[in-house]
Amino acid sequence: MKWAIYNLLFLIVYPFLLPGFLLRMLRRGGYKARMGDRFALYPAGLIKANDYVWIHAVSVGEVQVAGQLMREWRTAEPSVKFCFSTTSSTGWKMAEKEVKEGDVLIYNPLDFPTFVTAALKRVKPRAIVLTESEIWPNFILKARKMNIPLFLINARVSDRSAPRYKKAKWFFSDVLNAFTKVFAQSELDADRLKAAGLREEKVEVTGSFKFDVAHRNEAKEKELREWIGEGKLLIGGSTWPGEDEVLLKIYKALISTPTPTPTPKLVIAPRHFEKADQVEANIKAAGFECLRRSRNDSALRLKSTATPPVYLADTTGELMGLYGIGEVVFVGKSLCEHGSQNMIESCLCGKPTIVGPYTENFRPVMSDLKEGEGIVQVQNAEELEREILRLFKDDGGLGKRAQAAVSRRTGVVPKCVKAIREAIG
């Protein structure tokens, strides 16, 4: 009865969500050519095998987690083939870099029995791996009914979701226990999953995959350094609305104080590139010229300008390269928004890294970094300014401690790949 109600609500609610979905399509693009995937209507000849490992990931971070698992799996089993599904055009662009010859890239079907059944019967995967918090009830339950092994990797439950999961234990218990195994990031995440009805023997605490995901990209670092030029860089990584304005104000203070020559430069990489126009407007309103990566704007024409320009990195897949050449890094969605973006990448590069007070999406990671004294967490914009100015003078070994803390936590991915492969035989 509860699943009949769930599916009835899906039919009622989805038409109201459709306008927002279509608006995102128009803003981000990339959906139209494969809209049929949402209804398990795949291009002719796309599905060429019946032994895929189906991997599902949505956000950029999740795709990176999935990609690391795929690379590790290929090392252990070179003949493996993956069917990679995502739900966003951003995820699609990132996933294109992970799929290889013989793999398949699709959009995930809508979570309605007709569509998920058709998709699973068409792909016929030998196993399914979902990432982090990708809980799709119909998809999961149907896969279990078809005896397809199911795994949830790098599993986490946010502060916001935890009370809902617990209250809806009657609903989530069946879904969670359909998994063959759940690999949780932390004891807290495991406890929250168990409070939502997951049986204890189904969950294993492995730590965060994200410690294994980050890798320096020296070629990209060189390319970006050529674009920006010499000088020390303040990097605003994966910023959200409100954080750009704060960084611009701090940058004014930074360049007005005695600083090393040449003058430090500010690079802002917004989390959502469709907001880049607004970020550019904020940069100009602050009195700076804006050089956009997507336009390949050059600083050569600005040599005579007294005020340095601000660099807007509005392209996909270059953030790690920016972190590699940065001097001080602020990681966004942590000051003006809740949850935070990935701070591991800049720490891996040995860069002094600052986050705001809202880092609940990375609680186990933050715990490890704080234990190793490898990160600075501030509570407001005033503290952020003070710490940025201090770290530009002397980081006191913060970057080295950050790098060491990350290195100590690696090895999660090989462990999970081994466990999954053993489970599916």
Image: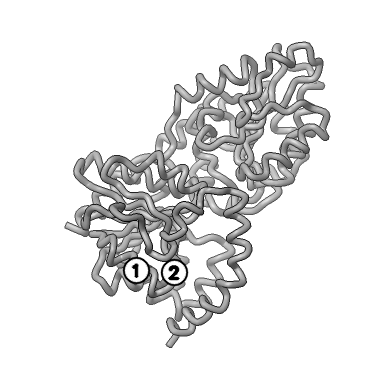
For the residues marked 1 and 2, what is the alpha-carbon distance in whole angstroms? 27 Å
Q: Percent x, y for residue 54?
A: 31, 56
Q: How many numbered callouts?
A: 2
Residue 390, quarter of the rendered image: top right
Task: Determine crowd level at label 2: few under 14, some 14-19, many 20+ residues with C-alpha closer than 10 A.
Answer: some
Residue underneath mark 1: 200
Q: Quadrant of residue 22?
A: bottom right
Farthest residue, direction front? 44
Q: Amino acid at mark 1?
A: Glu
Name the residue located 54 percent from the left edge and 34 percent from the top edge.
319
The residue at 61%/35% (across/down) is 314
Which sits in the foreground, 158 or 100? 100
- Is residue 69 found left or right of 251 in the rendered image? left
Horizontal and vertical percent for residue 225? 56, 19
Front in this rendered view, residue 108 or 1: 108
Q: Quadrant of the N terminus?
A: bottom left
Is 318 placed left or right of 116 in the picture?
right
Q: Which mark is residue 111?
A: 2
Residue 6 seen in the current view: yes
Instruction: State which quarter of the image contains the C terminus.
Output: bottom left
Q: Residue at x 76, y 39 (%)?
A: 246
Secondary structure of residue under mark 2: loop
Task: Find residue 392 and report its horizontal and vertical position in percent.
Answer: 67, 23
Kind of residue at disc 2: Asp
Q: Quadrant of residue 135?
A: bottom left
Sequence-wise first label, 1 or 2: 2
